[in-house]
Every structure is written in structure tokens, then in C-alpha cells.
Amino acid sequence: MGGKDREQQEWFLGFRRSWVSVSGCGEGIEVGQGAIGVSRGGVGVSWGGVGVSWGGIGVSRGGIGVSRGGIGVSRGGIGVSRGGIGVSRGGIGVSRGGIGVSRGGIGVSRGGIGVSRGGIGVSRGGIGVSRGGIGVSRGGIGVSRGGIGVSRGGIGVSRGGIGVSRGGIGVSRGGIGVSRGGIGVSRGGIGVSRGGIGVSRGGIGVSRGGIGVSRGGIGVSRGGIGVSRGGIGVSRGGIGVSRGGIGVSRGGIGVSRGGIGVSRGGIGVSRGGIGVSRGGIGVSRGGIGVSRGGIGVSRGCVGANQNRRGAWAEVRRSIRVFGEQEVAGQRVGVRGTGRDSEQSRPGDSNGKNEGHDSSKDDGTDDSNSEGEGCDSSDNSNGKGENSDGIKTEDNGAVASSSKKFTKSKNKSIPCLG
């Protein structure tokens, strides 16, 4: 990289907030750390999550709240529970849950996928030979029974659902409320909608959803897995080439876009995130808040960490994604070509423009040059060092060897452009 990577740490709400500051333009944080709030986040060997928890995918830990969660050997969940996928445990509430040999669920129940037990409420549920569901019912995937409420449900030849409906995965029927749902050729959903996995339709509310070629979602949106569309709210989402998300955003898994809020996100080459950020899994970018993040080879930074004064809406960046110019558009700053972490001021040498300013440059080293490349200082003499410790060269680029990060002045985290 263009310079040293230094970890910035800060105590916030009694927790330590850490991130990696990468010097030089055109460089990312692939194995770095990122977070929202006081948490850590990332994909791969990094940590991350939402709140004070840790989370990630791979060997990392994370979750939402004070819990831990992740995918693989990690632990995590939502609340005070633990959860994950693989050998981990986790769930929502005080329960445990996971996928594989783990246990977990929602509430005081246990649940999981495989040989584990779990569910929502006081019931048990899981996937495989386990039992579980939501409420007092039983449910699972395989030969088990379960559902939500007094109904029964499962995956395979079992029946189940939520309320008085029936549901399952395979040839069974089921859903939530008076609807039907399932996985395979079955129909089902939540409310009056239909949903399922495969060629079925279903969702939550009046929408349709499913997995495969079906459509569905939550609310009035559509969603599904495969080529379907769906999401939560008025958005669309799905898995595969579909679009969807939560709110007005779009999201999905594969080449789709989506996220939560107005952001976009997905899994694969898609983009998305939570809030106004972008994120995804694979080569995509995204994050939570105004930051960017991703899973895999994606790059990202951490929202509020870019500006300690908390001016999330004052971050403006121009990024290029898959040959399409995308502008985060968070601050009315000088339009740049890459990483502008602070509003550029011509000839500003008081350190406010530290970071990576790649705004317009007329090619000269006049006193009000806005910098070329990574320059964000007064480069009237072509050289010199800013008060923030960033030395510039003749062409306005930051001398990477002179990059300094201070606890009080570093307000930016360079993102990949």
C-alpha cells in the first residue's frame, strides 16, 4: 500500500472502537476492520456487527446488540443470545440457535438446523430430525413437525404453519395466518399472501414471495430466491438476479441490488447495505450507515468513523462500480473523482481537508488548487506539509511516507473508489 496502516482506537460509550486507516488513494480495506457505532465489522478475518457486538463471516464473531454471531466457527445472535452457522450457537433473545450441530431459537426456546432443536417462544424447532416452531407448536425441516401458533409445520413431508394455517417444505402446505406456504410446489406465506420455495408463490402481508422462480416479500413488495423479486415494505428483493430489500431499497443475492432503507445491497456482485450505505457479499461494496462494506473481495469503510463529529450527511464521495458512476451524495462538496472525505476548501491548510481529496484540479499548483489525486492541502508551493501531518508532492499527491494519523485529527477512513 501507499503507506502504513494504523489502527485508530477510541473509547465510545464504554467500548473501544477500532478501525484501520489505509493511506494512499485507490486502496481498500479487505482484511481490515469496520463497524457501526461502537461495534466492529468486516468480512473474512475481520470483526464487525451492529451496536456493541461483533460480527462477520468466516472466522469472525459478531451480531446485533450485545450478542455475538457469525458464520462458520463464530458465535453470535441478536440480544444476549448466541448464534451462528456451523458449530456455533446463537439465536434471538435468551435462546440459543444456529445451523449445523448448534442449538438456538427465538425467546426461551432452542432451535437450529441439523440435529439441533429450537424455535420461537416455548416451542422447539430445527431442521433435520429436530422439532421446533413458534408458540406452542412444533416444527422443523425433514421428518419433523412444527409451525407458529397452534399449527404444525416442517420441511419435507411434514405440515405446519403460523396460526391456523398449514405449511412445510416439499409437498406440504402451510403459512402464517390464513395463508398457505411451503417449500417446493407448495403455496404459503404470512397473512393473506402466498409463498413458498421453488415454483410456489408467497410472502408476508399482501405480497407474494418464494424461493426459485416465485415472487414474494413482506408488505406490498415482492421477493423470492432465484429470479424472483421481493423484499420488505415497498422495495423489491430476492436471491439470484432478483431485486429487493427493506424499505424503499433494493436488494438480493447474486447480481441483484438491495439493502435496508434507501441503500442497496446484495450477495455476489450486487451492492447494498443498511441505511444510505451500500454493501454486498462478494465483490460488492456496502456497509451500515453511510459507510461502505462488503463480504469477500469487497471494500468498505465505517460510517461515523469517517467524521468524528458525526456529520454522516457531510460525506460526499464519487465511486465507480462496475463501470457505472455512482455518487454517495452525502455532502454538498466539490465534485471529485474519488475519495473526498471532507468538504474541500481551496487552499485550506488548517488540516480540515486531511484524508483523500480527489476533487477537481486545474492541473496547476496555484494557491487555491483543490488537489490532484489525494491532495487536500494548500499546495501553492507544490510541496510542504499540512498542519494535519500530510505531506504533499509537486503534483498535489500525498507523500505516503509522511501520512500520519492522529487521535484528534483523523476524521476520515479512505474508501476504495
Image (cartoon, helix red, strand yellow):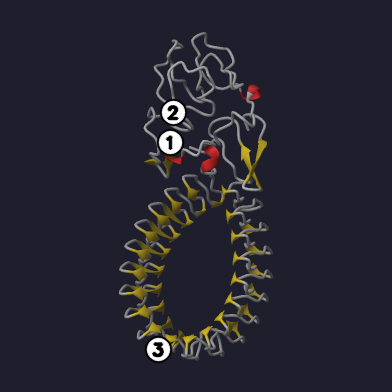
Q: Which residue is outermost to the front?
A: 13
Q: Amino acid at mark 1?
A: Glu
Is the residue 414 above or below the residue 109 in the image? above
- Residue 271, visible in the rendered structure: no
- Callout 1: SS: helix
Q: Is residue 237 left or right of residue 160?
A: left
**Residue annotated with mark 3:** 165
Position of residue 222 relative to residue 407, above or below, is below
Residue 314 numbered tag: 1
Instruction: Evaluate if marks 1 and 2 touch, with contact meaning CB atoms under 8 Å apart.
Output: yes
Element assignment for label 2 = loop
The earlier-in-sequence mark between 3 and 1 is: 3
Kindly identify the amino acid type of the residue bearing the numbered disc 3.
Answer: Ser
Q: Which residue occupies 49% across, 10% down?
A: 380
The location of residue 358, given as percent across then percent down, is 46, 27
**SS class of the residue under badge 3?**
loop
What amino acid is at disc 2?
Gln
Quarter of the figure that contains the N terminus = top right
Left or right: residue 147 compared with residue 261: right
Residue position for label 2: 343
Could you tell which of marks 1 and 2 lies nearer the N-terminus?
1
- Which sits earlier in the primary sequence, circle 3 or circle 2? 3
Instruction: For marks 3 and 1, give the CA distance.
Output: 49 Å
Q: Nearer the viewer, residue 164 or 340?
A: 164
